Amino acid sequence: MSDAETVVGRMINALNEHDLDRAMRFFSGDVVGVGPGGQAEGHAEVASYYTAFVDAFPDVRMTVWSTVARDDLVVVEGMYTGTHRGPVLLPGGGSIEATGQGISLRACVAFTVKDDQIVSYQSYYDQLELFARLGAKLVPAIDGPCCNTSPHGSVLRLFQRRRR
């Protein structure tokens, strides 16, 4: 196992134990993280991202399926599991309040490690899959510059909580 792989493994273990202080010791002060929800720069923003995720899924755990390491790059593939017990922020504002719904979310994260610290990471997971499991759906929207047009010509706005 490479030193970089050891650093990433220890950070994931700390997150799985919900020890954010210990997990953050594995990140450099100027770490940059990029994921489907946007970009986090520096310790404070990365810690805020992980805090929000653990607040939304207090029992969250990542089960690692495979790890590939080469030099300072470590790629981890796995599954996040947990129970939705707090708000999840939606793109463009709003949130999905706790549903009690369990999630199983496939993910892949590429970490760059230098001097035994994570200096960057790119996280890949399917936001649509996550939001759909929590009861969000695509709804028709008004035409405008903020909206995307599907190949079939209909305009969709990302996710709105289902009204019961």
Image: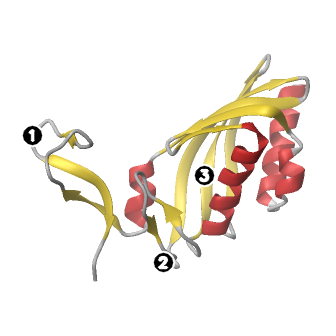
Q: Report whether 89 appears left or right of 61.
A: left
Return the x and y of residue 76 as percentages of the image width and height: 67, 37
Q: CA separation, marks 3 and 1? A: 33 Å
Q: Report whether 92 appears left or right of 118.
A: left
In the rendered view, tell whether residue 52 sits above or below residue 146: below
Q: Are marks 1 and 2 in contact (CB under 8 Å)?
A: no
* Kind of residue at disc 2: Thr
Image quarter for residue 31?
A: top right
Q: In the image, which is nearer the foreground, mark 3 or mark 2?
A: 2
Q: Which residue is mark 3?
A: 79
Return the x and y of residue 155 as percentages of the image width and height: 15, 46
Return the x and y of residue 47 as percentages of the image width and height: 74, 50
Secondary element at image label 2: loop
Q: Which residue is mark 2?
A: 99
Q: Quadrant of the N terminus?
A: top right
Q: Name the residue located 61 percent from the left edge and 62 percent from the top edge.
A: 81
* Kind of residue at disc 1: His
- Residue extending furthest bottom? 164
Lower position in the chain sequence, tag 3 or tag 1: 3
Lower position in the chain sequence, tag 3 or tag 2: 3
In the rendered view, tell whether residue 9 sits above or below residue 90: above
Q: Report whether 92 appears left or right of 152.
A: right
Q: Which mark is residue 152?
A: 1
| Crowdedness near tag 2: few (<14), some (14–19) or many (≥20) residues, C-alpha within 10 Å | some
